[in-house]
């Protein structure tokens, strides 16, 4: 491949960290939204 294996693994790790940050943010938003509703 064009990227060395170490660079590829680092890139994957960064993407995974970003994904987890986004997931946590969405979970936080969802839990806040559900608590705010009075159904």
Image (cartoon, helix red, strand yellow):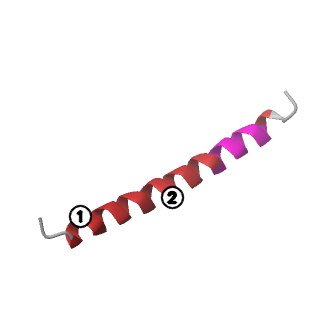
Q: Is residue 7 magenta?
A: yes
Instruction: Judge from the rendering whether residue 14 lies leftward or rightward of residue 26; answer left or right.
Output: right
Q: Residue at x 63, y 48 (%)?
A: 15
The span from disc 2 to disc 1 (Cα, nearest Å) is: 20 Å
In the image, farthest residue toward the left? 39
Residue bounds of the magenta highlight:
6-14
Q: Is residue 28 above or below residue 14?
A: below
Q: Is residue 16 above or below residue 37?
A: above
Q: How packed is label 1: few (under 14 Cα within 10 Å), some, or many (20 or more)? A: few
Q: Quadrant of the rendered structure where residue 25 is? A: bottom left
Residue 24, numbered circle: none
Q: Earlier in the sequence, mark 2 or mark 1?
A: 2
Q: Nearer the viewer, residue 2 or 33?
A: 33
Q: Is residue 29 magenta?
A: no
Q: Is residue 31 above or below residue 8?
A: below
Report the quarter where the N terminus lies.
top right
Q: Which residue is the site of mark 2?
A: 21
Q: Which residue is the site of mark 1?
A: 34
């Amino acid at each position: 491949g064009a990227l060395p294996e170490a660079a590829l693994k680092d890139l994957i790790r960064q993407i995974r960290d970003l994904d987890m940050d986004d997931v946590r943010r969405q979970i936080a938003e969802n839990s806040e939204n559900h608590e705010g509703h009075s159904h």
